Image: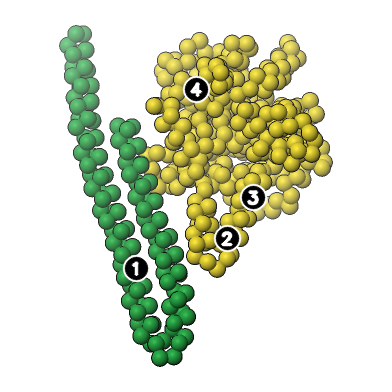
Chain colours: A green, B yellow
Amino acid sequence: MKDVKRWKGLRALVGDAVEHGASAIERVHIATAKRPFTVMEQIPGIAEPVKGIHAVHDIIVTNTYGAVRLVNRAVGQALDAALDAVDEPADTNEAEVASDLDKSSKDRT
Amino acid sequence: MGKKLDEALAVLNGLVGDHLARTGNGLATEMAFYRAGSALKLTRSAFERSVPNPRARVLVLVHGVMCTEAIWSFPDQPEHDYGTLLERDLGFTPLYVRYNSGASIVENGAYLARLLDGLPSAYPVPIEELVLIGYSMGGLLVRRACRVAELEQLGWLKLVKRAFYVGTPHLGAPAERMGRAVSALLRAIDDPYTRLISELSDLRSQGIRDLGEAHLHDESDEARLIRSLREPQHPLPLLPAIKHHLIAGTLTAHDAIAWLLGDSIVPLTSAAWRTREPNAVLAIDQIKVINGLNHIALAHHDDVYAQLRSWLDDDQENQA
């Protein structure tokens, strides 16, 4: 039981790290890309198309990192369900053993 | 494996324990008394099972940040620590506290106060005296717990006559304050990479942040501005009803280097509570500076044990 609790904790921690890590790297990615885009957006003639490309770039980046976060959450939920499934029979088994012990001690008395 | 896992979890708790506790993560350590690596439930039966031959004088040892009670073990004799030695030599029963050192010191201090409050009813024999020993952050927890007990008039405080602080940053830890300043500097630079580094360093737990100024006051006390940590009106003065003893380490006997580096983590001024104005609660003979000891060694060293024993011996003689 304690082990499962810890495994679940580890799963949640890795999930949090991926979630926050993806968001942090996304911010860096968008901020870094903004620099050349900002320079090119000042150049007459290409400013308008560059603005469009910049917007499309940011949408793609946001969607990509969003997909990473989504998959991370889905995997997390699947692992939680699997850990719950592993935990359940053990608990049931322990409860049955406890109940049997209780019954046999009553029988003896 | 178990001990190594416990130590790894202690480091993790120290680093991000506030996040673990906030999110209900199963890796967060819950505060409890420990004996032989196992948590004790606060029930009479659990104590009767786990504490053979309980004595009326109880020693409570509180470890520091990112470690467990294993920090007290002497490296060459792992079965010995200050607790077992004082049990053998002076007849104390040692109880070791393990906790999530990443949670705030105020929060942990309150938990410790509650834990100690449940001890007299769970302990198999009436407790005559509680001696508290805090190492590093543990000493700050002891101070906060005593403050909570004083405010809430908890019965266990009357049992505490003596408290010992080993390498405790009573006036804060400059390393944390420096780290905070560097992080703020990196954040101020308009560059996504330096900001990312700053974000990473800001992940450190509330417990570690609290060490910067020895943050011991709760929300209601927040209104009191700390003009200077070195002033006698420190937000949480030492309780006068308890005899306090401080042990500080220094890397070298050389005055200037000792002043500069302290025990490598906690400066001498902070561990030995050296303020401009004398502290009314601390006499000179209640502070011991041991040269040649770094911060980690303070938790398990013959010289520290000899000093602890000597103070406890003196008090026993005085009481007799």
Image point 21% across, 8% down: which residue?
Answer: A109
Q: State whether residue B71 is above or below residue A4.
A: above
Name the kind of residue labelled 2 in the image.
Leu
Provide residue B37's location: percent of width, then percent of height: 45, 23
Q: State whether residue A21 is above or below residue B37.
A: below
Provide residue A78's location: percent of width, then percent of height: 23, 48
Image point 43% across, 44% down: which residue?
Answer: B20
Q: Is residue B212 rendered to the left or right of residue B6?
A: right
Q: Answer yes or no: are tags 3 and 1 on the same subunit.
A: no
The N terminus of chain A - image quarter: top left
Image point 70% across, 51% down: which residue?
Answer: B226
Name the kind of residue labelled 3 in the image.
Arg
Q: Which mark is residue B186?
A: 2
Pointer 2 with pointer 4, Cβ within 8 A: no
Q: Quadrant of residue B38?
A: top left
3D distance between C-alphas at marks 2 and 3: 14 Å
- Residue topped by disc 4: B121
Mark positioned earlier in the residue sequence (2 or 3): 3
Q: Answer yes or no: are tags 3 and 4 on the same subunit.
A: yes
3D distance between C-alphas at marks 3 and 4: 41 Å
Query: On what subunit does the disc labeled 1 rest?
Result: A
